[in-house]
Amino acid sequence: MSLARRTVLGLLVTCLVAGLLMLLLEPGGAAAQTAGKLAGQRWYQLSLGDRSIGYYSSDSGRRSDGSFGFATELRFALTEGGAVTVRDSYRFAAAEPHRLLEASHELRRDSDALSVHVTVTDNGFEATIRRNADVSRRDLDWDYTLADYLAVEHWLARQTPPIGARVTTRSLNLGRLVMEREVYELTGRDAAGFELRNPAMVEDTRIRLNRQLIPEQFRLAGVFDLVRVDRQQALKTPEPLAAVSYRAPLDRTLQRTSELKRLDLRVETGTSLTLPDPLVLRDNPVVPDEGGNYLAATLEHPSDHPRLQRLVRDLGYQQPAATPAAATTRVRELVSYVHRFIRYDTGNEHMPVLEVLRERRGDCTEYADLFTSLARAAGIPARTIIGMAYTEEDGPALAFHAWNQVLLGERWQAVDPTWDQFRVDATHWPLPTDDRTALMLLTGQAELSFAVLATEYHDGTVFGAGR
């Protein structure tokens, strides 16, 4: 995986971070009354370690037609020339129950531009999606109001919850066009304000609000800091990080990697990370089900797009697989089809799935996202997995890689279309997106290296200390 492509993965993870920030940084309270009290513009500085890498701003208030408007902007740069800008806006009706009237989302990263505009219709909402030259539309059955948008503030202001209490809210993820549930826990209260924790989004995320329920400071996964400042301080020129390798070197070369059943590694550097020692990797590593809809069409995986649906019909998959055996055969065929369809190319920026269909090139993320989209279009639950896997480029190491997971019957199986593996080998190490380890590695905040302790192969051969 090229350095440029790996950097994009880092930016994508940071955009995930931005999704959390956008929920609580938009001022609010108990619907219209508190929303009016908290109207105004606020600025925040985003830092990684001792470096300022960007800013966040929010602006809310009544519009000329009486509706309630909220607008936010996040801009950051992790590497030189790699600026990312994310803008979101919402508008709610002036009259009770203050239903959502329209919303928009814009993401710009290098030459990649995505915009989503959601408008109300008689049956719900319609989203117009523009990604570079591609335009599509999607109907949405959302029901969302100002009270949903301001649920956390309403909970704090009106219910006076005890320390340790939790609230579950509904939020719109405009970047993925899905409705999500968020959980917040009250961890502290004093004369100055409140402390909240989001235990589900990213490990060890803390939020500090003042008595007016305005966020003052965030500490995200022990990596990112967001602090309320004046406009001039927020707009201070960011300090991009030096390029990082995103590699975890191994002390020796591995043999017959596709036949590896188990790989035992001792952590040599990187003891500040939360890792088991030894780290034991096994073939078919399965990431636990997070309760998602793995058949759903999303912006990243537009399985309902006519071009993908037509391709699935051409492959003969327009009907659901009749038996588990037929589903297994279909997955095998899709793995090999995607492997042949894409020409491996590490020198390109991230391409969305519809561009991959046109260009037929990319690296592991293009392989994985196309496979997820095709599998879902063919009625097979699938997801893209981000982690590290073995490479010998520039020496033996684990480097960032993407592959897939599919649900066959009641059992998840890991597959890798980049390497044409129906069952992935033991060099694959999935990184959970809700863990600070992934954030620290992606942002270059931790060095990591391993010594190989033992290897076990499917033919029963074991080298090193068997377990």
Image (tube, rainbow, N blue to C red):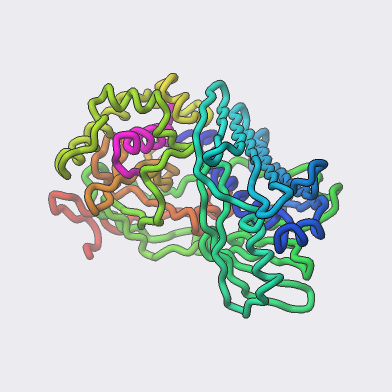
Residue 78: image quadrant is: top right
Span colored in magenta? 362-382
Tell me, yes or no, if residue 173 can be seen here: yes
Q: Quadrant of the N terminus?
A: top left
Q: What is the x, y in percent for residue 295? A: 36, 43
- In the image, 389: left or right of 123? left
Q: Quadrant of the C terminus?
A: bottom left
The residue sitting at 74% across, 57% down in the picture is 32
- In the image, 15: left or right of 387? right
Q: What is the x, y in percent for residue 271? A: 49, 63
Q: Along the line of sight, which residue is nearer the eye, 296 or 262?
A: 296
- In the image, 212: left or right of 245? right
The residue sitting at 32% across, 37% down in the picture is 375
Position of 283 relative to 195 (above/below)? above
Residue 380 in magenta stretch: yes
Tell me, yes or no, if residue 48 can be seen here: no
Q: What is the x, y in percent for residue 250? A: 39, 50
Total tally of numbered discs in the picture: 0
Residue 398 in magenta stretch: no
Q: Along the line of sight, which residue is nearer the eye, 115 or 266?
A: 115
Q: What is the x, y in percent for residue 87? A: 68, 40
- State the predominant SS element of the stretch in magenta: helix
Residue 63: image quadrant is: top right
Position of 196 relative to 419 (above/below)? below
The residue sitting at 43% across, 53% down in the picture is 431
